[in-house]
Image (spheres, helix red, strand yellow):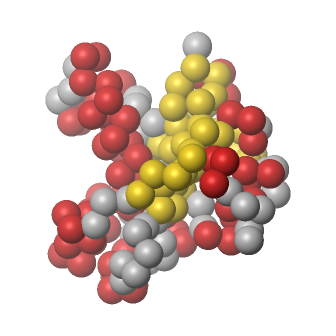
C-alpha cells in the first residue's frame, strides 16, 4: 500500500529529484496512528492529517536546515519504519526513488525566516513549535506547492 511522506530537505538538496543526493535512511513525516491520536483526527480527516504532517516536516526542516522545504513522495509502506517521534508523524524512510517524488513545498519568495530559523535551530518539533517566532511564521506564511516538473536541475 502507498503512503504520502513529507521529507524536509535543505535547498542545496533539491537534486533529490534527480537522485543526487539519494534519499536513504532519511527522517520523514507521515500520517501515523500516533499522529491521528495526538491531533484527535479520524480516518475521514486524512487530508487534514496529511497537511499537519507536512507542516510538522516544515518545522523539522526549519530546525535542521534553517529553511522550510519539504519534498512530497508516495512510497510503499514497507519503506517506512517508526521514528523516534511518531506522535509528530516521524518515520525513517529507508529509501525513496526520484520517481516516487511528486512535488515539493517551499517558502514564498521574499519571506524572511531568519528569526524563526535562529530560534528553532537544533530544537525538537515540540520545542520549536512553542517559539513565538515559529508560530508567527506558521500563522502568516503558508508554503507554496511546486510540481516536480518545475525542478530545473538546480538552475
The answer to whether one can see residue 94 in this image is no
Q: Residue at x 46, y 36 (%)?
A: 30
Which one is nearer the viewer's eye here, 86 or 58?
58
Quarter holding the N terminus is top right
Q: Quadrant of residue 41?
A: top left
Q: Position of residue 52 (x, y in %)?
A: 31, 43
Q: Residue at x 38, y 59 (%)?
A: 143
Q: Residue at x 51, y 31 (%)?
A: 4
Which one is nearer the viewer's eye here, 15 or 86?
15
Q: Quadrant of residue 31?
A: top left
Image position of 74 with respect to 64: above or below: above
Q: Position of residue 13 (x, y in %)?
A: 69, 64
Quarter holding the C terminus is bottom right
Name the side, left or right, on which 48 lies relative to 113.
left
Name the side, left or right, on which 42 lies relative to 26.
left
Q: Position of residue 150 (x, y in %)?
A: 63, 54
Q: Residue furthest top?
A: 1
Image position of 39 with respect to 113: above or below: above
The answer to whether one can see residue 57 in this image is yes
Name the side, left or right, on which 65 lies relative to 87.
right
Q: Position of residue 85 (x, y in %)?
A: 42, 45
Q: How many marks?
A: 0
Q: Residue at x 80, y 51 (%)?
A: 18
Image position of 114 with respect to 21: above or below: below
Name the side, left or right, on which 122 lies relative to 142.
right
Amino acid at each position: 500500500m502507498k503512503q504520502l511522506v513529507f521529507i524536509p530537505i535543505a535547498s542545496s538538496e533539491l537534486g533529490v529529484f534527480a537522485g543526487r543526493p539519494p534519499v536513504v535512511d532519511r527522517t520523514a513525516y507521515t500520517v501515523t496512528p500516533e499522529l491521528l491520536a495526538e491531533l484527535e483526527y479520524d480516518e475521514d480527516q486524512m487530508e487534514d492529517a496529511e497537511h499537519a504532517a507536512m507542516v510538522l516536516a516544515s518545522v523539522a526542516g526549519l530546525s535542521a536546515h534553517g529553511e522550510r522545504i519539504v519534498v512530497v513522495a508516495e512510497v510503499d509502506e514497507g519503506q517506512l519504519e517508526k521514528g523516534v517521534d511518531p506522535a509528530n508523524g516521524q518515520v525513517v524512510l529507508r529509501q525513496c526513488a526520484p520517481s516516487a517524488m511528486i512535488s515539493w513545498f517551499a517558502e514564498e519568495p521574499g519571506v524572511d525566516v531568519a528569526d524563526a530559523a535562529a530560534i528553532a535551530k537544533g530544537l525538537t518539533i515540540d520545542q520549536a513549535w512553542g517559539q513565538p517566532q515559529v508560530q508567527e511564521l506558521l500563522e502568516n506564511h503558508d508554503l507554496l506547492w511546486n510540481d516536480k516538473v518545475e525542478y530545473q536541475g538546480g538552475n
